[in-house]
Amino acid sequence: MGLSLWNLLKASLLLANAAMILNRKRFLAQYGLDDITNGDTSNPLKVQLTGMLHAMQYLKVPVIALNAFTIVFEIILGS
């Protein structure tokens, strides 16, 4: 498996899938990443990460479509 644009797309798709399955109440609440309006501005990285995880919830439909496209493409090419 060489470094190519297709493999980078698949890796980013896997990371997007992993970020979207994180449960807000069971997992993210343990680390304080469940509420974007908590007003904790002392750690800007934590605020950015919380915002990114909340924004990922809006990408569910495009990621599902990309997953389907990737599966079909892999079946056709056989790689």
Image: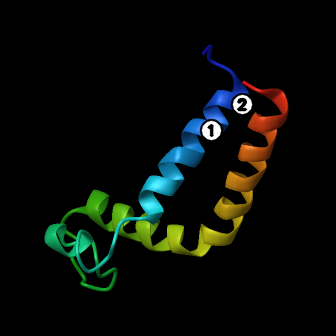
Q: Residue at x 72, y 45 (%)?
A: 71
Identify residue for label 2.
6
- Residue 77: image location, x then y, percent: 82, 28
| Disc 2: CA contacts within 10 A as few (<14), some (14-19) or many (>=20) | few
Q: Is residue 33 left or right of residue 61?
A: left
Looking at the picture, does residue 8 appear above or below residue 25?
above
Instruction: Name which quarter of the figure residue 28 lies in.
Output: bottom left
User: What mark, if any, has residue 10 been given in the picture?
Assistant: 1
Q: For marks 1 and 2, give the CA distance.
A: 6 Å
In the image, what residue occupies the spot 21% across and 62% down? 43
The label shown at residue 53 is none
Q: Amino acid at mark 1?
A: Lys
Question: Which element carries disc 2, helix, strand or loop?
Answer: helix
Residue lying farthest to the bottom in this orientation: 37
Q: Vertically, is 39 above or below 11?
A: below
- Left or right of 29 in this view: 55: right
Viewport quadrant of the N terminus: top right
Front residue of 32/37: it is 32
Q: In which quadrant of the rendered view does residue 66 lie?
A: bottom right
Q: Amino acid at mark 2?
A: Trp
Colouring convention used in this rendered image of the protein:
rainbow
- Measured as percent of width and height from the top left, residue 74 is found at 75, 35
Q: Residue at x 72, y 24 (%)?
A: 79
Q: Position of residue 60 (x, y in %)?
A: 61, 70
Residue at point 78%, 50% (across, down): 69
Proximity of marks 1 and 2: CB atoms separated by less than 8 Å: yes
